[in-house]
Amino acid sequence: MVQRNKEQEQEVLNWIFEVLGEPVPKGDYEEILKNGVILCKLANKMTPGSVKKIQERGTNFQLMENVQRFQAFMKKYGVPEEEIFQTADLFERRNIPQVTLSLYSLARLTQKHPEWNGPSLGPKMAEKNERTFTEEQLRAHQGELNLQMGYNKGASQAGHGGFGNTPEWLKSCEFKDPEFVQCSTTSVQGLFDQLSKGIDGLEGIETTDPMRIDRIRILQGEGPVSVNASLSKIKVTGFAQTKVVQNQVSNKDYSWITSVKLPKLRMEGNYHMNGRILVIPLNGRGKCFFEPSNMDIKFYTKTKLYAKHGHTFYNVTSCKVQFTMKGLKLRMENLFDGVKALEDSTNEYLNQNWRPVSEALKPIISKTIEDILLDLMQKIFHQIPGDFFITDLPKPDQLN
């Protein structure tokens, strides 16, 4: 591989930040460029609007998409495809000289764009200068098995953590392992534990404890509960204490059956309800909380596999839950148009009769938990590959 040229790297940085009109930051060359943010800003300076979305922070997946957007810009701008660096050349430092060469090529091409009135870099295109850009440099990256993203010339990504290594908190498992169920259970426990702390860069999820939900709509017209209700501005706490008892994954349809214990789950927010629970008519709107305790929950998750960025991902299509509980506390304020005595006596009755009330409220609580889990898992598994969890899932080229 061609050796790095620190002088050229500094020239590239000077040119980029002169184009951007910003001072050159301190730091290593590759670290300044690695997340693709600066490169995408450069693209938009050279051709306004060429990169529609720049991911300022996020997972390795999302940051690599910045680099891929810049690669697409270079190709459209006219950089020959064989001169465009591959994502792993920068992101995993596989071939930093190729990154530098690509940026030199891009800078030289500005001479072919009459609209360009910015700074230049390198010799004029009419001049020959084989001393700096040799055939060896142009092809330095070829002949290696690089992890390639974007314009990858067809090389394989199978088996590599192309967006970085599997996180330390995530235990990878194999179907063929005789202890697969135990391994998978440990893996899911690790996921729950980490989600309660927050996974840096996981888009759309800050933490699962507390978790905030904008709105849940509930329509229940059969049995002991008949309500038209909605919950809004919901704060959910308790998921940090989740204990995963068992996680089973089918190697046929890749569905999951997950059993967990939850000491306490508290949902509080605003309610709007019209209907009845047991024999009690309930009409009102205001603040509320529901607090089931000592829950045994089993959720059934359906998935489909799909390929993205050289990895196999889960598309979570549905999640249904069954549960039991050994306690329930609740309160709804402003029932009966604010008649305080009637409101208090109704809440007292519902709490004293929590067993039949919990059975009556099961569809409502189930719906709430299902909505939470489905939204959560769709966001998680859209961003974290399924083959990080189970390494012998079908490879992308094996999927229909």
Image (cartoon, rainbow, N blue to C red):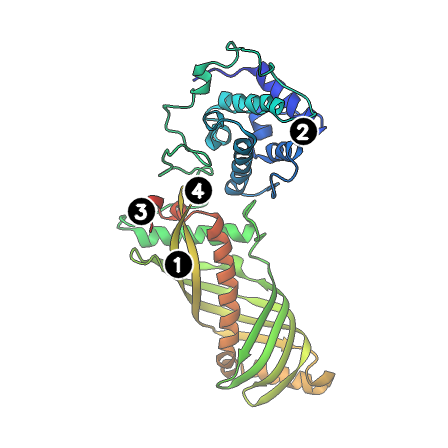
Q: Judging from the image, what secondary structure is the residue with disc 3 in?
A: helix
Three-letter amino acid code at disc 4? His
Circle nearer the N terminus (2, 1):
2
Q: Position of residue 265 (x, y in %)?
A: 54, 66
What residue does disc 3 label?
398
Query: Of the residues under marks 3 and 1, which one precedes in the sequence?
Result: 1
Q: Which residue is mark 4?
A: 309
Residue at the (40%, 62%) spot, across then down: 301
Which of the two discs, 3 and 4, labels the residue nearer the N terminus? Answer: 4
211 or 36: nearer the eye?
Answer: 36
Query: Please, what is the three-letter code of the amino acid marked with disc 1?
Result: Thr
Estimate the spatial distance between the alpha carbons at disc 3 and disc 1, rounded to whole Å.
Answer: 17 Å
Q: Are marks 1 and 4 in contact (CB under 8 Å)?
A: no
Relative height, residue 363 to residue 39 (above, below): below
- Identify residue for label 1: 303
* Residue tagged 2: 115
Q: In the structure shown, which secondary structural element does the residue marked by tag 2 occupy? A: loop
Q: Residue at x 56, y 34 (%)?
A: 73
Q: CA distance from mark 2 to mark 3?
A: 46 Å
Direction bottom: furthest residue: 279
Q: Residue 256 or 4: which is nearer the viewer?
A: 4
Q: CA distance from mark 4 to mark 2?
A: 35 Å
Residue 35: x and y in percent read 56, 35
In the picture, residue 27 is in which quadrant? top right
Q: Whole-percent x and y of residue 15?
A: 65, 22
